[in-house]
Amino acid sequence: MSAPPLLSIKGLTKHFPLKKNLFDSLLNRGDVVRAVDQIDFDVQPGETLGVVGESGCGKSTTARLLMQLINPTAGEVIFDGMRVGSRDLPLKEFRRQVQMVFQDSYASLNPRLTIEDSIAFGPQVHGVSKQESLARAHDLLERVGLAPARFAARYTHELSGGQRQRVNIARALALQPRVVILDEAVSALDKSVEAQVLNLLLDLKDAFHLTYVFISHDLNVVRFISDRVMVMYLGQVVEIGPADGLFDHPAHPYTRALLSSIPAMDPEHRTEKAAISGDPPNPINPPSGCRFHTRCPAAQAVCSQRAPTLGKLHSPHLVACLMYEPDSGYQAKAIA
Amino acid sequence: MTGLMNPQAAVQPLEQSPGYWQSVLNRLLQDKVALGAGSVILVLFLMALVGPYIVPADPYQSSILGRLKPMGSPGFPLGSDELGRDMLSRLIVGARLSLLMGLMPVMFAFIIGTGIGLLAGYAGGWTNSAIMRTIDVFYAFPSVLLAIALSGALGAGIVNSLISLTIVFIPPIARVAESVTTQVRMRDYVESARATGANAFTIVRVHVLGNVLGPIFVYATSLIAVSMILASGLSFLGLGVKPPEPEWGLMLNTLRTAIYTQPWVAALPGAMIFITSIAFNMLSDGLRAAMDNKR
């Protein structure tokens, strides 16, 4: 953990303006959706960082911000010590180093291109010759378990979901990136195929010394694949820590609720009541103080007044909850 | 290439699926209606191409005595017009100008309109609004009115009516191009192409163009019929082709005086316009179906 982070995210924020009328947009007023609000986190070289949270908590927006597919409202992304978009690290070079696999395997492949052309597109953009790019595409198809002789000249609609996602992985790897962002990359696959693709991802990680940012709503999958896990709620990071520590001893009430929503394998431990109820509040007007206080079983008066900061619980494990902040005014009842 | 070079892979045949356009052609060849429409169009093109060399009589040769003969008269298999010219010859030779007026404006408008629509659709935001609102100004006029106004302003003549018809068809094509481009731009494969660091031009060329040309092309083919009818209208009003050139719209115009004496003969140019526009419409329908490779 002492090594310098490969990716460092500082104060990353994305507010989507809600278009009301021309005057509002000109005067830059009106409501905004706070999709991602002031998040900070690091990704260490060689690790897999899992990102979990309910729908709409800003996971995918974070991925798109990381990839610079949308411009952040504020904050910056630092890669290998260099700010993305600066002279040291132009956007194009950053994009060679960081690639992304999308959830929808079908929509993320051009239906008019053969699979080999889809994979070879990226390298060609970066000046690799067509011949060499195609050779690389065939190698990668082999690596992801699709025989090039059978699949290279096919079109997207002729493949199954699992095969398509393998192509997408090959496409992301064609640029020989160091970081791959997997945005719900296995969520749309059925369970048996999902397991195969997860194992493939683990193999590829070892073979190419990759670093993963693995975004998913599936907690079991995240635990399986991640070294560290980050929990998001309403556009903010509420807890981040080593996967085992976080799953075995969740600190934040939201994380606890989220984890207890995993169906128990043991019928003796079946939970009857819902771990957490209701939908997340509207991100246009997030609750004051701690954003989770409206649904938090341990909320106190102070929680609606004071926003918690992401602080150390114990060394690598960080949590944003007043319960763990000394002198926050939270009446400790020894919950830990 | 490594996979292809190892001998084991070379033994098994390469599973090559037919290219996209090849599969479109295959599907089109199975569509009987489209095939029929296609052969009608082929005949029309042949008429336009070799018409002047195969006509039974000189299409410009008038005869005082042979005016407004009914169909089947000796020497006039399809009758004669108000100046005693052979209808069959004039209809055959007329295909040349009528098809020209149908195809050329649409072709030019397809190129220009697609360019404008791609630019607006891919750029989005303010660029999109600026371009599309300007297009809307033209779009607000009924197409017939716009064509007449432009032709009137430019003056009568074939070239001027080609120009005015082109201008009439740019807005609708640009609109279709803009809307399909906007849809395609949102797709994940365009996002992932952006994520490779490719510039906008490369993305449009490789990933957008191939996915938008189909729908725009199909829409454009449906405009060929409209263009022919509009061109006929312009000729009818004396703004397009000038007499004595044979062109179906103009012929319809000059023969309208004979509608009570020789209704069948007078209706012939109209029938040709009808057949041609129906054929183009059916072909574009078939094309639309054939281009859908997901079925």
Image: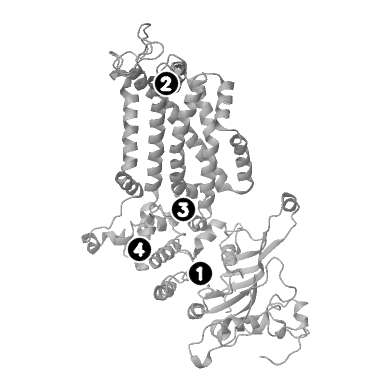
Q: Which residue is mark 4?
A: A139
Q: Nearer the viewer, mark 1 or mark 3?
A: 1
- Above or below, A244 relative to B219: below
Task: Compare marks 4 and 3 and give the one earlier in the sequence.
Answer: 3
- Quick one: label 2, few (<14), some, or many (20+) residues within 10 Å? many
Q: CA distance from mark 2 to mark 1?
A: 62 Å
Q: Which residue is mark 3?
A: A125
Discs 2, 1 touching: Cβ within 8 Å: no
Query: Quick one: SS at disc 1?
Result: loop
Instruction: Please tell me the numbered disc located at residue A184.
Output: 1
- Quick one: label 3, few (<14), some, or many (20+) residues within 10 Å? many
Looking at the picture, how far across and down is residue B21, in whole percent? 35, 46
Which quadrant is the N terminus of chain A positioned in? bottom right
Q: Are marks 2 and 1 on the same chain?
A: no
What amino acid does circle 2 point to? Answer: Glu
Task: Compare marks 1 and 3 and give the one earlier in the sequence.
Answer: 3
Which quadrant is the C terminus of chain A positioned in? bottom right
What amino acid does circle 3 point to? Answer: Val
Q: Which residue is mark 2?
A: B247
- Quick one: label 1, few (<14), some, or many (20+) residues within 10 Å? many
Tell which residue pokes out farthest to the top in this image: B64
What amino acid does circle 1 point to? Answer: Glu
Task: Compare marks 1 and 4 and give the one earlier in the sequence.
Answer: 4
Can you tell which quarter of the image residue A128 is in? bottom left
Looking at the picture, how far across and down is residue A178, in whole percent? 49, 67
Q: CA distance from mark 2 to mark 3?
A: 51 Å
Query: Quick one: SS at disc 3?
Result: helix
Looking at the picture, how far across and down is residue A30, in whole percent? 74, 58
